[in-house]
């Protein structure tokens, strides 16, 4: 009886956690790494640290809000059904709305940081388009992830702007760099998941031709960005480990896919990329 009770409690806790906690663990990196890189580049120019912290609180609260709202309205993976679940989900929604509301009120006090409204509108549009594409067809699922990523990585120029007060070419370059990195990561992770049982160059090439084309286009885009002085050479070089691991996969022997390990590995690439990107902008300046 005790064993059954503990199993029931564990399953209940897992359900509650799924109702209120974002399930897209990789999306946390897509949100926070751009925010950290944009903020770090701005702080190295002598910006405002407190504003960055407030922006981070608002961004995390708004991102977290999506899961309990979907659970409340039944648009998510699971729906709040019992009165207890609905009360809990409502409390979480209320707390997150309050936290994000206070943070945004502080950021916009006395008409400050108005350009954030433009960035927020873009992010909202991206998430709406993502939802439409996700429900349209299986073939548009990956495109919907890419569009959603564009909305998440908007935290890079937002953080740079909130710290420095400038929404300039450097801010947009940070967004483009973070977006290109994130899109490559999404494409690679999807390729690995759907190619876990493939073996040999021929099978992998058949499945991953579009990914290789994307790698070539990424290299071309980086060369143009460097030549046009949109990206410092060290910032462009931050993509090299990503390009290497994507190409090396086609030459590897078949091995079992451990999704959790893949996630941690990609997080490591993202952190290394962020450090190199910040250093590239700082040294290149």
Image: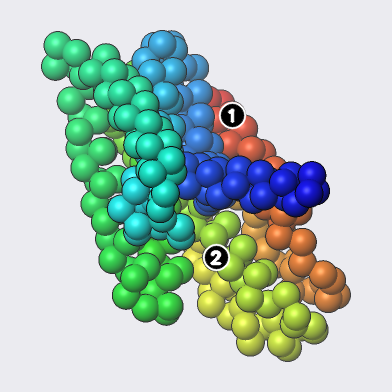
Disc ID at residue 187: 2
Q: What number is the disc on residue 108?
A: none
Q: Which residue lies furthest to the front in this view?
A: 1
Compared to residue 220, the image places residue 110 above or below, namely above
Residue pictured at 37% horizontal, 31% vertical: 91
Name the image quarter holding residue 189: bottom right
Q: Position of residue 69 (x, y in %)?
A: 34, 45
Residue displayed at 66% across by 44% down: 9
Query: Looking at the image, which residue is at 79% across and 83% down?
Result: 199
Q: Which x, y percent locates residue 173?
A: 39, 41
Locate residue 101, reporting x and y percent.
Answer: 27, 24
The correct choice, above or below, for 29 with respect to 198 in the image is above
For mark 1, does the 10 Å Cα neighbourhood hold few (<14), some (14 to 19), or many (20 or more) residues?
many
Farthest left residue in view: 111
Q: Residue at x 49, y 17 (%)?
A: 44
Which mark sits nearer the N-terminus, 2 or 1? 2
Instruction: In this rendered view, identify the residue nearer to me: 20 or 266.
Output: 20
Task: Give the colour scheme shown.
Answer: rainbow
Residue position for label 1: 279
Circle 2 SS class:
helix
Lateral position of residue 208 relative to residue 85, left or right: right
- Disc 2: CA contacts within 10 A as few (<14), some (14-19) or many (>=20): some
Mark 1 element type: helix
Marks 2 and 1, how far apart at CA: 26 Å
């Amino acid at each position: 009886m005790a064993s059954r009770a503990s199993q029931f409690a564990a399953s209940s806790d897992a359900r509650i956690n799924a109702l209120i906690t974002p399930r897209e663990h990789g999306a946390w990196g897509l949100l926070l790494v751009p925010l950290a890189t944009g903020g770090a580049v701005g702080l190295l120019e002598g910006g405002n640290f407190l504003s960055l912290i407030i922006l981070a609180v608002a961004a995390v609260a708004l991102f977290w809000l999506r899961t309990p709202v979907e659970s409340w309205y039944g648009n998510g993976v699971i729906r709040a059904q019992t009165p207890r679940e609905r009360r809990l989900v409502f409390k979480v929604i209320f707390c997150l709305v309050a936290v994000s509301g206070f943070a945004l009120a502080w950021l916009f006090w006395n008409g400050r940081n108005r350009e954030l409204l433009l960035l927020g509108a873009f992010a909202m549009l991206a998430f709406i388009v993502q939802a439409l594409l996700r429900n349209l067809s299986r073939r548009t699922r990956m495109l919907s992830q890419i569009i959603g990523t564009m909305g998440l990585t908007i935290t890079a120029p937002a953080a740079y702007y909130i710290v420095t007060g400038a929404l300039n070419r450097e801010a947009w370059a940070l967004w483009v760099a973070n977006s290109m990195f994130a899109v490559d990561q999404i494409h690679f992770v999807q390729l690995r998941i759907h190619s876990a049982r493939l073996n040999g160059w021929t099978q992998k090439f058949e499945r991953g031709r579009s990914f290789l084309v994307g790698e070539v286009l990424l290299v071309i885009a980086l060369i143009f960005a460097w030549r046009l002085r949109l990206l410092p050479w060290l910032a462009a070089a931050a993509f090299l480990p990503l390009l290497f691991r994507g190409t090396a996969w086609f030459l590897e022997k078949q091995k079992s896919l451990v999704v959790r390990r893949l996630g941690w590995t990609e997080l490591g690439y993202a952190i290394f990329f962020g450090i190199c990107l910040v250093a590239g902008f700082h040294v290149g300046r």
